[in-house]
Amino acid sequence: MFIGHIAAGLAAKRLTPRVSLAMLLVAAQFADLLWPVFLAVGLEQVRIDPGNTAFTSLDFVSYPYSHSLVALIAWGLALGWIYRSLTDDRRSFLVLAALVVSHWVLDFATHRPDMPIYPGGAKVGLGLWNSIPATVIVEALMYGAGVWIYLGATTARDAIGRWGFAALAAFLAVIYVASIGNVPPSVPALYVMAFVGSAVLTLWSWWADAHRTADGPTARLRL
């Protein structure tokens, strides 16, 4: 649920206006930032299997350390604690931790039963990905709501804030549509593309968000 995770990060700006959008998106996608690293070093496994579900050609063989519920609770607490220790922002601890854990909740809705509750434990999933129309409708509604909430929580200070974010929002929508049913050429190509995509998204979202003003008298962007 790539664009659904993005939606959660966008919406969280209303709750934590002082946290940059880049940081919120990092938290919402934290599992998917860890996953290519663990793939690259051999800790987790994925198999390219066209037709695995209607929406994706990937068979998530094993990803207990990046995607299990228990692991994400631990990762969320760690990320929230580190950010709070650097900024002394109590609310950010709760929001960032919740965003990390939200990744499992959203993936549980979309994946077939391959989402581990804990490493070595039972795997669950509701299988929304078995229907492309249903998946697109749900995620499009989530994404639209996330963009709307973010725009309502911030105001562009200049053309970069206005058009930089608009271009980012459009780019993400295009990438999402292009990913439907896409078959990567190899597993190494998959995690290399994930590394590059994550870097581009983080830098672009930070840049656009830095040119927008968060609502509220005490709102000030932090990294």
Image: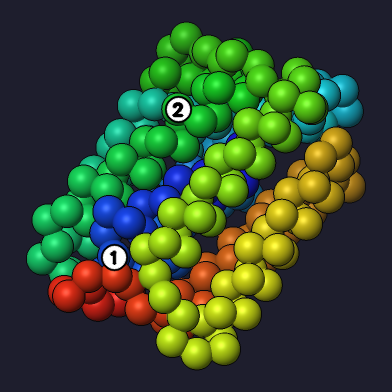
Q: Residues within 10 Å of mark 1 (few under 14, many from 20)?
A: many
Where is residue 201? Give x, y as percent: 59, 66
The local secondary structure at tag 2 comes to helix
Location of residue 157 (image quadrant): bottom left
Q: Mark 1 points at which residue?
A: 17
Q: Quadrant of the C terminus?
A: bottom left
Side of 125 where 64 appears, left or right = left
Where is residue 53? Give x, y as percent: 78, 22
Q: Name the residue under label 2.
A: 105
Location of residue 127 (image quadrant): top right
Location of residue 13 (image quadrant): bottom left
Q: Who's the residue at 72% across and 24% down the image?
A: 134
In front here: 54 or 151? 151
Name which residue type carries label 1. Answer: Pro
In front here: 196 or 109? 109
Q: Who's the residue at 56% across and 15% down the image?
A: 125
Residue closest to the far top = 122
Name which residue type carries label 2. Answer: Val
